[in-house]
Amino acid sequence: MENKFNNLIKIMKNEKMTEEEKASVYFKVETFVNNNPVKNPLSPYLKVSPYFSKFSFATLGKTVGVALLLVIIGFGGIALASASALPGNLTYPLKIALENFEAQLASTPVKKIAVKSKIIETRFKEAEELIKTNKRTDEKQAMIDSSIAENKKEIEDNLEIISKENPEVATLAKANLETLIQTSEKELGILITEKSDDLNFIENEILSNKATFEEKFKVDLELMEKIETLDNIDNLDPEIENKLLIQDTEVISDITPAVIPDLSASVISAVPEEINNTSSNSEENNQTNP
Amino acid sequence: MPFKSSQMVEVKSQNLNKEFNASYERFSDAIFRYCLYQTSNRQKALDLTQDTFIKTWEYLSTGKQVENLRAFLYKVAGNLIIDDRRKKKSESLDKITEQGFDVKNDRDEISIIENAFEKQLALDTLEKLDKKYRNAIILRFVEDMEIEEIAKTLKESKNNISVRIHRGLEKLKIILEENQQ
């Protein structure tokens, strides 16, 4: 019995996917993973799994604390509602209310800093979006600036509390916050300049094209006027005749009907003679050379 | 260099991806076996293996905690198997055993046939075992899990698992003797 059992177990243990099957399943899983990236890779509320990470919140040392706080300041804590609602949108007040609610839930200075950092980051994203979509106004920018300043102040107040126990940590975190804000403001400044350049370029294009259109129209107008004043098509200036031939049908249709029959008549009348001459020549040739 | 939150997100995401890929390499065959011996259908087992890892990623990607990934994968696989059973509740036992292994290779080699036959026999044997005992036997002897780990995976007490293994072995003995006859 033992042999049979061992044999059974051995057979079962040897069972596995073929290389093709394994690759096929992996491909589908990988596709899903790529299409569904990590949503909240770091959260102050997250208990870190020893399996997945060597970083443990439970073993707090000063160096770990610094890294933690710097990461929180830079990362901004848990992702809040999407930045799709912008100042001026109907749902924007709701977004602000949700942010305030989450801030109230934060019970410790570190958690408050995390939430406030995220809010500042969201404000900068909103400013960026307003610039990109040409919806930026002084009033909306002022709203954003005010929110950033307010949340920055609250972060600094909480850093004061932390500095009593960990002055180095608080100092580093504050420096990091300043750098983050300055960098974001600088990037926004560059974006504004680029956008302004884009707008100037577009405006110039419109203006230059407008001149081109006007010039073309003016030529068309001149052409039409000249043709309409002519008594005889034979008096048509060659240059104008050329322009007439390459003109749009719309322009030609604007020409008075009296001119077209004359023009076409003169062309048609010329052709038959040539054809007749050619035909008679060919008949003579056929008779002499069968 | 200023600290960019988007860079931090990227680093964390890459670490999780890397470790998840490693877990696939390490556990995919085990999960496949587990699904195969529960469903007796190779294609179904492949689909369930795929779904197990996908569901696990869905869970991990929201930042939730996983203490023991192997146990977690088995739990997810177990739940998917249960769902699958509910869907095909009306199928007869004959049909289930008919599905068995797919011998995809057309080569008429004796070793392949014998292997398939042995595997089929293994499947048939397991089919006759009650699923409670089957689970415990597979995890203990095929996947070399400790009693404690099996208990956590199946959400049972250690005593229950020990009893199931013991009873499962007794039952298996009878089935193997019947097979011989």
Image (spheres, rainbow, N blue to C red):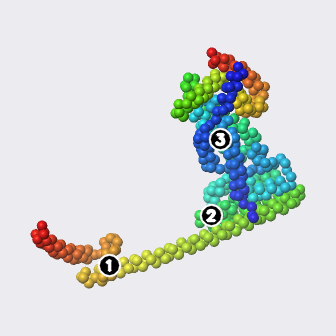
**Residue B90, image x, y percentages:** 56, 25
Q: Amino acid at mark 2?
A: Leu
Q: Quadrant of the N terminus of chain A?
A: top right
Task: Kindly identify which residue carries mark 1.
Answer: A242
**Of all residues shown, which one is farthest toward the left?**
A287
Q: Tell me the subunit letter for badge 1.
A: A
- Residue A236 in the image: above or below residue B174: below
Q: Residues within 10 Å of mark 2 (few under 14, many from 20)?
A: some
Q: Are marks 2 and 3 on the same chain?
A: no
Tell me which residue sits at (57%, 74%) in the image: A200
Cα–Cα gap, marks 2 and 1: 52 Å
> Which tag is nearer the camera, tag 2 or tag 3?
3
**Residue B35, image x, y percentages:** 64, 33
Task: Kindly identify which residue carries mark 3.
Answer: B53
Q: Amino acid at mark 3?
A: Phe
Kind of element beneath mark 1: helix
- Residue A70 in the image: above or below residue A194: above
Residue A170 in the figure: left or right of residue B161: right
Tell me which residue sits at (63%, 71%) in the image: A193
Question: In the rendered structure, which disc, 2 or 1, sits on the residue that comes first in sequence?
Answer: 2
Task: Kindly identify which residue carries mark 2.
Answer: A130
Residue B111 image-quadrant placement: top right
Q: Residues within 10 Å of mark 1 (few under 14, many from 20)?
A: few
